[in-house]
């Protein structure tokens, strides 16, 4: 996939999604359903995608490029192709406040999935929900270790 192609017309997107750990066991039909409700967003280098304290409820899946997650200006982690961010805002529906900044490091293309469709998708695909929980646990462990240093 290149920066100029569209996710809706790109067969490589399904291939990419099959390689994302949270989607490993899904068939093409399930993956197409999530692509259809998602929108494509492209971000220039140094563009703020999510601002800490801001409001939002969408999940971003990185299709191309790289982002940095920062909290209070401190680098928490870098995420690349096949990784996701923004899930905390809609998993914790009490405030939907963003817990960190996410900034594009290079030109970055994301599949942006709104909360309402993600909830429906997870209800139909509970194994994905389990993988999201595992990913969040790994991130929490990594963040705790990073903050302890």
Image (cartoon, rainbow, N blue to C red):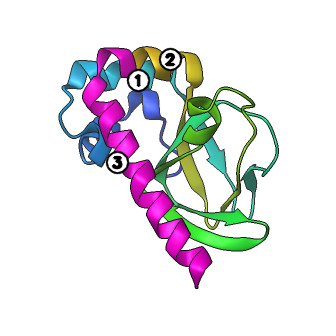
Q: Which residue is drawn at 72% across and 44% down?
A: 98
Residue 84, percent across and down? 48, 47
Q: What stretch is highlighted in magenta?
A: 122-149
Going from N to C along the chain, the mark reached first, 1 or 2, is 1
The secondary structure type at the circle numbered 3 is helix
**Label 3: which residue?**
134
What's the CA distance linking mark 1 and mark 3?
20 Å
Within 10 Å of disc 3 (Cα), the crowding (few <14, some 14-19, many 20+) is few
- Closer to us: 118 or 46: 118
Q: In the visual, does 130 lie left or right of 63? A: left
Q: Are marks 1 and 2 in contact (CB under 8 Å)?
A: yes
Q: For numbered disc 2, what is the local secondary structure?
A: helix
SS assignment for the magenta stretch, majority: helix
Numbered tag placed on residue 34 in the rendering: 1
Mark found first going from the N terminus, 2 or 3: 2
Circles 1, 3 touching at the beta carbon (< 8 Å): no
Residue 69, image x, y percentages:
63, 62
Residue 16 seen in this snapshot: no
Structural crowding at the residue carrying mark 1, measured as other residues with C-alpha within 10 Å and reported as few (<14), some (14–19) or many (≥20): some
Q: In which quarter of the image is residue 56?
A: top right
Q: Quadrant of residue 147?
A: bottom right
As drawn, which residue projects farthest toward the bottom?
Answer: 149
- Dot 1 or dot 3: first in sequence order is 1
What whole-number distance in Å separates the C-alpha atoms at marks 2 and 3?
21 Å
Q: In this view, does 87 lie to the left or right of 26?
A: right
> Is residue 131 magenta-colored?
yes
User: Along the line of sight, which residue is nearer the eye, 122 or 5?
Assistant: 122
Can residue 73 be seen by looking at this rendering? Answer: yes
Residue carrying label 2: 117
Alpha-carbon distance for marks 1 and 2?
A: 8 Å
- In the picture, the disc for residue 56 is none
């Amino acid at each position: 996939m290149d920066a100029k192609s569209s996710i809706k017309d790109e067969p490589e997107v399904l291939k990419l999604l099959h390689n994302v750990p949270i989607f490993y066991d899904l068939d093409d039909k399930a993956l197409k359903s999530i692509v259809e409700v998602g929108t494509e967003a492209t971000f220039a280098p140094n563009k703020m995608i999510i601002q800490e304290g801001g409001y939002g409820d969408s999940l971003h899946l990185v299709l191309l490029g790289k982002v940095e997650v920062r909290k209070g200006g401190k680098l928490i982690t870098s995420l690349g192709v096949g990784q996701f961010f923004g899930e905390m805002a809609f998993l914790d529906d009490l405030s939907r406040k963003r817990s960190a900044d996410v900034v594009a490091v290079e030109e970055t293309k994301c599949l942006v999935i709104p909360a309402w469709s993600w909830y429906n998708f997870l209800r139909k695909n509970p194994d994905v929900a389990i993988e999201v929980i595992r990913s969040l646990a790994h991130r929490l462990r990594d963040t705790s270790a990073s903050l302890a240093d």
